[in-house]
Amino acid sequence: MNSGDDGNGIMNKYDTIIFDMDGTLLDTLEDLTDSVNHALAYFGLPMRTMKEIRSFVGNGIKQLIDLSVPDGKDNARFKDVFDLFARHYSGNCMKKTSPYPGILELLQELKNEGHKLAVVSNKFDDAVKDLNRHFFSKFISAAIGEKKDVRRKPAPDALLSAIDQLKSDKGKTVYVGDSAIDIQTAKNAGVRCISVTWGFCEKEFLAASGAEIMIDLPKELLGLI
């Protein structure tokens, strides 16, 4: 654990924990890769490696497809690939996806301690809600993804909306994520951020992106709050 606090539990004033989804709660990389490659292959476009997809995720599915398709949005097949990916992923987003080790135990402990919990993700809203219902319905009631009336992260809209839904406030909220976008989202919303190192970004990248507090295992979050 790399912490920006004083080691004396100063984070115990936070009772609201909001999580990113992909790379933080769920390892979604295989299903994302399979759906991207299904759409690319259908239209005769070169497929992507899992390592490439890992570097593309975090800023919504349009950005994911923009980076996956040769020439991005300038490719005449961009919309076709995007639409097919969205349909395929909606029906196949739980085939290989699973919570990271220790996540379910963490959420149970946080719930037992009375913390307010939510998910805020740049994944499209229907998938966020479906995945949350499937994996985390016992722990998390508020789940917000990308939709027309909510700007995607790093805009603070969804994070602030989740805080409102939980009837909490920014001063009592921590946002937990695995990317530079999550760090910036928390900053834009005026909340503290904890970065996890088990997700899609390397520890060195997170540090260079301004991470103040990093944890290597889910259980370390309990020691902070």
Image: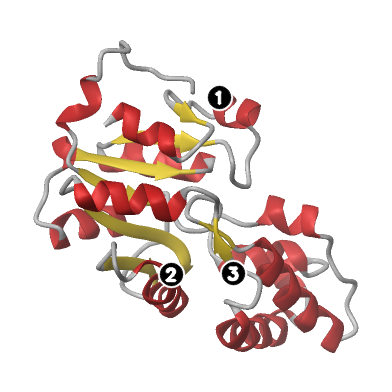
Separation (CA) of disc 3 from disc 2? 25 Å
Q: Is residue 199 left or right of residue 175?
A: right
Q: Amino acid at mark 3?
A: Lys
For disc 2, the marked residue is: 135
Q: Evaluate if marks 3 and 2 touch, with contact meaning CB atoms under 8 Å apart.
A: no
Circle 3: element type: helix
Q: Nearer the viewer, mark 1 or mark 3?
A: 1
| Color scheme of the displayed model | secondary structure
Labels 1 and 2: the sequence-earlier one: 2
Dot 1 amino acid type: Ala
Tag 1 and tag 2, C-beta contact below 8 Å: no
Between 150 and 167, the one nearer to me in the picture: 167
Residue placed farthest to the left in the image? 167
Q: Which quadrant, please, contains the C terminus?
A: top left
Q: Residue at x 37, y 62 (%)?
A: 151
**Separation of marks 1 and 2 at Cα, in angstroms:** 30 Å
* Residue 180 image point, x, y percent: 52, 39
Residue 49 tag number: none
Q: Is residue 65 visible?
A: no
Q: Which mark is residue 207?
A: 1
Q: Earlier in the sequence, mark 1 or mark 3?
A: 3
Which of the labelled discs sits on residue 62, or is there none?
Answer: 3
Residue at x 73%, y 74% (from the top left corner): 36
Up the image or down, 156 lies above or below 208; here it is below
Snapshot quadrant of residue 157 = bottom left
Q: Quadrant of residue 9?
A: top left
Tag 2 secondary structure: helix
Secondary structure beneath disc 1?
A: helix
State the image coordinates of residue 113 (x, y, percent, origin top left).
18, 45
